[in-house]
Image: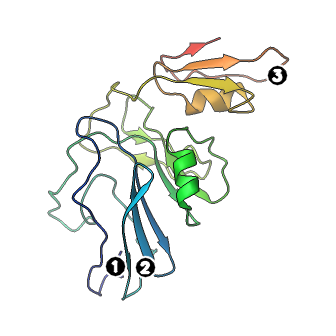
Amino acid sequence: SRDGVSPFYEVGTNNYGELNEWNHFSFTVNGSDLSLYINGELVDSDEEQSGHNSVYDLSQMGTHGRTNPPNTSFFNGSIDNFSFWSSTLTQEQIQANMNTPLSGDESGLVGYWNFNDGEGSTLTDLSGNGNHGTIYGATWSTDNPESSVINVPDDYATIQAAINAASNRDTVKVASGTYIEIIDLSGKSIILI
């Protein structure tokens, strides 16, 4: 965090999770307290001394710093399921959400991108807040985490919400009952039963 003028304060670690495995990273700010969680475990925390500014008009995922040219420090890896919140998540909330796709209507959710668009240059915000992103210089991958089964209505109340949360190769299993909705698979390679 930084306010554009003050020194940079950071939290960090030398343990970045497992190499060649999907890892979950969470960074939280609660007042002046900064915390970094990896795979649901707190790995570092610090107190910011200079204050932080939340009004940057442009943000970039997968890069170090803002758009101050030339910005050549990019993340070399894969990103999936990225979210911003207006409230500070607790460690318990982080652990509860890290292996389950979000529905998009969670309280305090500002933006949620599951990177399942699969093509094009638009990254769709699934929070309903319209914070869509633009993909620059990246390629879409089908190397998703292990496939999972999403149950309707246990995990998601509607079939469409479950489809929206699904990744390629996932199964959306719908319990018997009456569902009145129009569904759009959005070109996803999923199993719907």
Q: Which residue is mark 1?
A: 2
Front position in the image: 143 or 61:
143
Quadrant in which residue 52 is drawn: bottom left
Label drawn at residue 65: none
Residue 176 is left or right of residue 168, and the answer is right
Quadrant in which residue 136 is drawn: top left
Indicate whether 118 appears above or below 64. Answer: above
Front position in the image: 23 or 158:
23
The answer to whether mark 2 and mark 1 are in CB contact below 8 A is yes
Residue 127 in picture, x, y percent from top left: 59, 48
Residue 51 in picture, x, y percent from top left: 41, 85
> Which one is earlier in the sequence, the residue at label 1 or at label 3?
1
Q: Which residue is mark 2?
A: 53
SS at circle 1: loop
Q: Which residue is mark 3?
A: 180
Name the amino acid, label 2: Asn
- At 26% from the left and 39% from the top, the residue drawn is 138
User: What quarter of the picture does the C terminus occupy?
Assistant: top right
- Give the alpha-carbon distance from disc 1 to disc 3, as whole Å: 48 Å
- At 59% from the left and 66% from the top, the residue drawn is 87
- What crowding class fits label 2: few (fewer than 14 Cα within 10 Å), some (14-19), or many (20 or more)? few
Residue 97 is left or right of residue 9, and the answer is right
The answer to whether mark 3 and mark 2 are in CB contact below 8 A is no
SS at circle 2: loop
- What crowding class fits label 3: few (fewer than 14 Cα within 10 Å), some (14-19), or many (20 or more)? few
Residue 111 is left or right of residue 12, and the answer is right
> Which one is earlier in the sequence, the residue at label 2 or at label 1?
1
Indicate whether 159 appears above or below 124. Answer: above
Name the amino acid, label 1: Arg
- What crowding class fits label 1: few (fewer than 14 Cα within 10 Å), some (14-19), or many (20 or more)? some
